[in-house]
Image: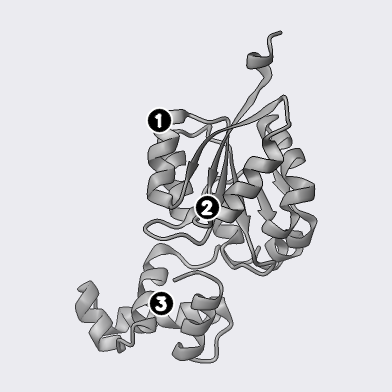
């Protein structure tokens, strides 16, 4: 079998150039893994995926224009067999279950890239799902909830912008009662004391 036949083609997506440079350095000496492209945001990630059709995509969660979960959903809708490893900084990131539900094959903390990235890429390429040990508990702790659904995330963003329930209802063309119901769900899912606390949690965990 030729080397080309066994080479795993990787797309690296992160808005921090230094992290992408670190991935380039890690892959430089590998004979079975090669970096075929880079992207700095979710929108560019989708475009690059369509063009390059990589075997494994390394996807940051917190990015401008389109976050990692949204980019993963978009890519997987077009390419159901896409293998995506989601990267995050936070052990308690509430987007863990959202990323997995979106179809991510692997999930890795950025602090573990140096020691775990290559084995994760190879395992995901082989068809296995991979979670770094540090976040296995985070996934389990969120198992009872799928996280915020898109409509709840939209309302949380408007809360963070300072809008009242009535203003949100007008903005989204729904009833104020419907907004109140969704706010109640948001507070419950985020274990937040009030609207302000929910907004702070959302910002801290990269939900908004």
Q: Quadrant of residue 140?
A: bottom right
Colour basis: one colour
The tag on residue 14 is 2
In the picture shown, does residue 203 fall above or below 118? below
Q: Helix, strand, or loop for circle 2?
A: loop
Q: Quadrant of residue 127?
A: top right
Kindly identify which residue carries mark 3.
156
Near-viewer residue (128 or 125): 125
Kindly identify which residue carries mark 1.
51
Q: Helix, strand, or loop for circle 1?
A: helix
Mark 2 residue crowding within 10 angstroms, few (<14) / some (14–19) / many (20+): many
| Residue found 49% across the figure and 56% down from its top | 15
Q: Helix, strand, or loop for circle 3?
A: helix
Give the image location of residue 102, x and y in percent.
Answer: 51, 49
Q: Earlier in the sequence, mark 1 or mark 2?
A: 2
Mark 3 to mark 1 CA distance (whole Å) = 34 Å
| Residue found 55% across the figure and 77% down from its top | 204
**Left or right of 197, for residue 122:** right
In the picture shown, does residue 143 fall above or below 48? below
Mark 2 to mark 3 CA distance (whole Å) = 24 Å
Mark 1 to mark 2 CA distance (whole Å) = 18 Å
Q: Residue furthest top?
A: 1
Q: Earlier in the sequence, mark 3 or mark 1?
A: 1
């Amino acid at each position: 079998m030729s080397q080309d036949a066994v080479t795993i083609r990787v797309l690296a997506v992160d808005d921090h150039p230094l992290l992408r440079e670190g991935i380039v350095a890690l892959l430089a000496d590998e004979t079975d893994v090669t970096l075929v492209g880079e992207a700095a945001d979710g929108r560019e990630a989708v475009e690059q995926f369509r063009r390059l059709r990589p075997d494994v995509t390394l996807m940051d969660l917190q990015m401008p224009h389109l976050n990692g979960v949204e980019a993963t959903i978009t890519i997987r809708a077009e390419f159901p067999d896409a293998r995506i490893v989601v990267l995050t900084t936070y052990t308690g990131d509430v987007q863990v279950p959202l990323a997995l539900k979106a179809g991510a094959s692997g999930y890795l903390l950025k602090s573990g890239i140096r020691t775990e990235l290559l084995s994760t890429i190879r395992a995901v390429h082989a068809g296995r799902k991979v979670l770094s040990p540090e976040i296995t508990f985070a996934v389990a702790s969120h198992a009872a909830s799928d996280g915020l659904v898109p409509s709840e995330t939209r309302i949380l963003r408007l809360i963070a912008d300072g809008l009242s329930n009535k203003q949100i209802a007008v903005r989204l063309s729904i009833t104020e009662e419907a907004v109140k119901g969704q706010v109640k769900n948001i507070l419950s899912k985020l274990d937040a004391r009030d609207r302000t606390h929910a907004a702070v949690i959302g910002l801290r965990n990269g939900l908004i």
